[in-house]
Image (tube, helix red, strand yellow):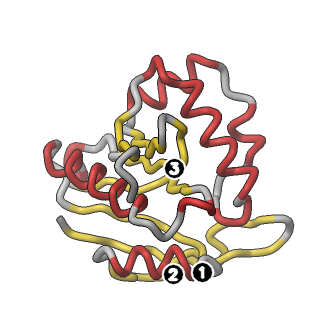
Amino acid sequence: MRAETQICQLIPAEWPLFRDLRLEALRCEPAQYASALSDWTALKPQDWQRRLANAPVFVCLEQREPVGMMGLLRPQARKMAHRATLLMVYLRAAHRGAGRAEALFDAVTAYAMDNGISQIELAVSVENARARRFYERIGFNAIGTIPCGFRHEGRDIDEVIMLRRL
């Protein structure tokens, strides 16, 4: 990773950066996400701000240019507060393989541990072998599969459920 790379948590006022990167991810990698681009393009500015206020989103900036992100979503139920779901994982193709995803995950993990989260879960498309290898490399274990976890362009796509204890 280059010295000009910075990882930071977005605040609600930075919603335009969040919006642009999230929409880019859904445009560039539509088959990798359960969300559709149309689900997000309809959001109003206050919706984007609310999402940042309610769930942490970390971005990777390279020379102040956003190149990737990861978010966490924690359940509302008190008995499940030790868990969170890793979501919105995206890194521009040209910036993969140089430690940026690991740096993002380190920031997510530090946040999680500081906030009493001891278990991170995720769902990843069975078709996304590169992402699955990355998650395994950083300590996630597959714990199951959801057949037809989501549908993309009329195709059923299974999802692998993965978990990492902190």
Q: Is residue 8 left or right of residue 22?
A: left
In this view of the protein, which residue sits in the foreground, 5 or 76? Answer: 5
Q: Which residue is depicted at the point 15% across and 51% down?
A: 113
Label 3, label 2: how many angstroms apart (C-alpha)? 26 Å
Quadrant into which the N terminus falls = bottom left
Quadrant into which the C terminus falls = bottom left
Mark toward the start of the polypeptide (1 vs 2): 1
Mark toward the start of the polypeptide (3 vs 2): 3
Q: Position of residue 2 (x, y in %)?
A: 39, 54
In this view of the protein, which residue sits in the foreground, 8 or 36? Answer: 8
Q: Are marks 1 and 2 in contact (CB under 8 Å)?
A: yes
* Label disc, if present, on residue 145 of the rendered structure: 2
Q: Position of residue 100 (x, y in %)?
A: 41, 58
Q: Are marks 3 and 1 in contact (CB under 8 Å)?
A: no
Amino acid type indicated by mark 3: Gly
Residue carrying label 1:
126
Q: Position of residue 93 (x, y in %)?
A: 62, 62
Q: Is residue 146 left or right of residue 140?
A: right
Q: Is residue 12 left or right of residue 125?
A: left
Residue 78, quarter of the rendered image: top left
Amino acid type indicated by mark 2: Thr
Q: Which residue is depicted at the point 33% across and 57% down?
A: 103
Residue carrying label 3:
68
* Label disc, if present, on residue 42 of the rendered structure: none
Label 3, label 1: how many angstroms apart (C-alpha)? 21 Å
Q: Nearer the observer, disc 3 or disc 2?
A: 3
Q: Is residue 46 above or below residue 164?
A: above
